[in-house]
Image: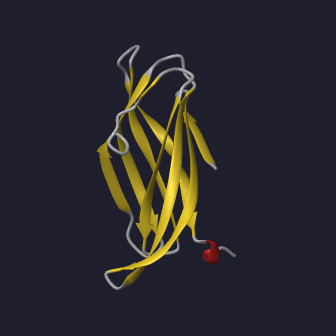
Amino acid sequence: MFTQVTKGIKVSVSTTFEGTFFKNYKVHYAFGYTITIENQSKDTVQLTARHWDVFDALKEMETIDGEGVIGRKPVIKPGKSHTYSSGCLLAAPVGAMRGHYDMVNFTDTEEFQVEIPTFKFAAPFAIN
């Protein structure tokens, strides 16, 4: 598990290898990840956007920006958490992701970024 805390917001990530499949006559490696965002601060916050840098050992880095996560902009009260699962396809059996969430603090309306720790993907057969 990969974990990082920014301004009282703890982000924990676990990854899974989902398998390989062919798409457009090329093999692809499917990885899943589950993220838990825990509000350890005293203020209610809302996740408004996400930024990802996706590293694939066989391709250029890809940047992804978007609103919320999986179609939601969760409001997280103090002591509560939000968990979601998603995934990515890589051309290589190894890679990584990192990024940040844009958040807003409901108490003082401050906008801030919460770092997502770099987490790695590796197919079991690619690990020494």
Horizontally, residue 90 falls left or right of residue 125, namely left
State the residue in front, 3 or 34: 34
Residue at 58 percent across and 71 percent down: it is 123
> Which picture quadrant has residue 23?
bottom left
Residue at 36 percent across and 45 percent down: it is 70
Quarter of the image where the C terminus is located = bottom right
Horizontally, residue 76 falls left or right of residue 79, namely left
On screen, 73 above or below 45?
below
Residue 20 % position (x, y): 48, 75
Q: Give the color scheme: rainbow, by chain, secondary structure or one colour.
A: secondary structure
Horizontally, residue 127 falls left or right of residue 19, namely right
Residue 101 % position (x, y): 41, 39
Residue at 43 percent across and 24 percent down: it is 45
Residue at 63 percent across and 72 percent down: it is 124
> Which picture quadrant has residue 54?
bottom left
Residue 3 % position (x, y): 61, 43
On screen, 5 above or below 8?
below
